[in-house]
């Protein structure tokens, strides 16, 4: 009889141990799932940020090209003459300028 009582006690302890192990594994699984969900969300936000930054880089590259073209244009004789006439009012010797009277009103 003592062996049976002892066997039942060991059996109950084994069941208790199995339940505790199952609970621990389930708890660990929940923690891993929650953490992986937050990591996926963080990864998605980083991908969105990368897309935004990539589009900004493309815009800045276009702007850089426009500035380079404008820099080239500002060194031309045509640009220099245009600025001299429009902003400084300079003309070539013997050049006649006609002004529209209706534009002044």
Image: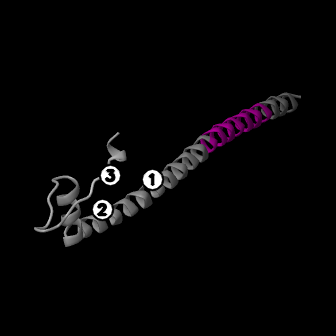
Name the N-terminal-most of marks 2 and 1. 1
Res 17 → quadrant: top right
Q: Is residue 23 magenta?
A: yes
Q: Residue drawn at (48%, 56%), measured in percent from left and top?
A: 55
Residue ID for mark 2: 67
Which percent across, then down, holds residue 30?
Answer: 68, 37
Judging from the image, what secondary structure is the residue with disc 2 in? helix
Mark nearest the camera among 1 and 3 is: 3
Query: Residue, x 23% and y 62% (percent of image)?
Result: 82
Foreground tag (2 vs 3): 3
Residue at mark 2 to residue at mark 3: CA–CA distance: 34 Å
Q: Could you say which disc has been placed on residue 53 in the image? A: 1
Q: Which residue is mark 3?
A: 100
Residue 32 is situated, as x and y percent measured from the top left of the image, at 63, 42
User: Does residue 45 lie above or below 83 as drawn?
Assistant: above
Q: Is residue 15 left or right of residue 57?
A: right
Task: Farthest residue to the left: give it.
Answer: 93
Disc nearer the start of the sequence (2/3): 2
Residue found at x 66% / y 42%: 33
Q: Which secondary structure lies at badge 1?
A: helix
Q: Residues within 10 Å of mark 1 (few under 14, many from 20)?
A: few
């Amino acid at each position: 009889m003592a062996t049976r009582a002892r066997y039942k006690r060991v059996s109950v302890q084994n069941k208790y141990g199995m339940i505790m192990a199952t609970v621990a594994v389930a708890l660990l699984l929940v923690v891993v799932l929650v953490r992986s969900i937050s990591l996926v969300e963080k990864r998605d936000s980083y991908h969105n940020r990368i897309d935004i930054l990539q589009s900004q880089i493309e815009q800045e590259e276009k702007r850089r090209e426009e500035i380079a073209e404008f820099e080239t244009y500002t060194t031309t004789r045509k640009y220099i003459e245009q600025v001299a006439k429009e902003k400084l009012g300079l003309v070539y010797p013997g050049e006649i300028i006609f002004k529209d009277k209706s534009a002044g009103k």
